[in-house]
């Protein structure tokens, strides 16, 4: 069992240490688990040129293909699950991680990592973790992955010897609370990896699914991919039981997208 860890930080500090602690927790449940750490700052990834060729034709025609991106993507495809980690930089993910997500933006159209479980790790000196989590949640959902959960940590409160201390100081109660959260999150991650259960999507996931499906009316490439996957007329990326409220919400979204999409085609 292999877990790909996308490290957005340019340093091997707080975010990396949290991921290592998750690794130790995971290995208590599955000793043979393999962690594939992908340090984005150590890879050559060119900036997106905004040409939209990947959307309109194929990601294989990207003019930035002479870098490490495809090698990284293959490591993600070969993994059974993913952890994506970033510190908060100016209330956003790091530049390294944003560049990576920009270049992988065609995965919002053609979800090649669909169904893989994912954890989100965010560290901060104070604020901004919610904003970064929301962005990464949107990314994971848009890629069709199964978000198992997230951990958001104020580093100076969690790491006793951490310098600089900042406005927050170490707090034993906070540290213990986050330790318990790490243990529970790791246990749930292993369960999702081992059981192969299909996670019930949230209303947010269902909303994202149908918004992304709308792209099949504007892109022949996307429609061909979704048709091949059998996603055009279903409720979600994978078969899963939903309660009546979610089925109803998805049905309304599907009808609205179909109406708007057909009108676009008829223009």
Image (cartoon, grey):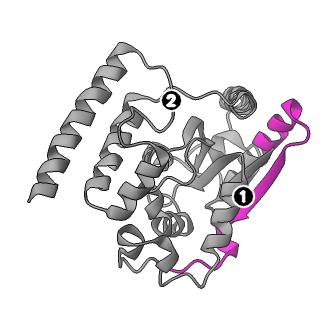
Q: Quadrant of residue 176?
A: top right
Q: Nearer the viewer, mark 1 or mark 2?
A: 2
| 163 is higher (above) or lower (below) than 171 | below
The structure residue drawn at horizontal position 23% and vertical position 29%, both measured from the top left corner, is: 252
| 138 is higher (above) or lower (below) than 219 | above
Q: Is 229 left or right of 255, judged from the image as shown?
A: right
Check contact, mark 1 vs mark 2: CB within 8 A: no
Q: Quadrant of residue 100?
A: bottom right
| 261 is higher (above) or lower (below) than 194 | below
Residue situated in front as seen by the camera: 140 or 109 = 109
Helix, strand or loop for disc 2: loop
Mark closest to the chain's N terminus, 1 or 2: 1
List the residue tagged with mark 2.
239
Of all residues, the one furthest to the right in this rendering is 31
Coordinates of residue 208 in the picture (x, y in percent): 36, 42
The structure residue drawn at horizontal position 61% and vertical position 81%, both measured from the top left corner, is: 67
**Residue 242 seen:** yes
Q: Where the N terminus falls, by quadrant?
A: top right
Span highlighted in magenta in the image:
20-46
Q: Where the C terminus falls, by quadrant?
A: bottom left
Query: Per the image, is 99 magenta?
Result: no
Residue situated in front as seen by the camera: 62 or 258 = 258
Of all residues, the one furthest to the left in this rendering is 267
Residue situated in front as seen by the camera: 250 or 34 = 250
Q: Residues within 10 Å of mark 2 (few under 14, many from 20)?
A: few
Q: Residues within 10 Å of mark 1 (few under 14, many from 20)?
A: few
List the residue tagged with mark 1.
13
């Amino acid at each position: 069992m292999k877990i790909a860890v996308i490290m957005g930080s340019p340093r091997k500090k707080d975010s990396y240490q949290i991921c290592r602690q998750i690794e130790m927790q995971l290995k208590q449940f599955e000793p043979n688990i393999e962690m594939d750490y992908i340090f984005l700052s150590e890879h050559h990834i060119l900036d997106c040129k905004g040409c939209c060729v990947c959307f309109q034709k194929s990601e294989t025609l990207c003019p930035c293909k002479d870098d490490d991106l495809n090698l990284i993507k293959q490591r993600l495809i070969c993994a059974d699950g993913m952890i994506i980690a970033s510190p908060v930089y100016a209330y956003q993910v790091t530049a390294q991680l944003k560049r990576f997500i920009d270049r992988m933006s065609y995965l919002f159209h053609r979800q090649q990592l669909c169904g893989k479980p994912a954890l989100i790790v965010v560290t901060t000196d104070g604020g901004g973790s919610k904003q970064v989590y929301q962005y990464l949640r949107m990314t994971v959902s848009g890629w069709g992955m199964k978000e198992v959960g997230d951990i958001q940590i104020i580093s100076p409160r969690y790491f006793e010897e951490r310098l600089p201390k900042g406005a927050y100081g170490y707090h034993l109660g906070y540290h213990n609370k986050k330790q318990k959260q790490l243990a529970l999150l790791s246990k749930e991650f292993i369960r999702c990896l081992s059981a192969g259960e299909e996670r019930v999507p949230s209303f947010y996931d269902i909303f994202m699914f149908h918004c992304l499906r709308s792209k099949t009316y504007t892109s022949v490439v996307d429609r061909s991919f979704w048709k091949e996957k059998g996603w055009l007329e279903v409720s979600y990326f994978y078969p899963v039981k939903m309660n009546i409220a979610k089925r109803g919400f998805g049905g309304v979204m599907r009808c609205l997208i179909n109406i708007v999409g057909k009108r676009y085609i008829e223009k």
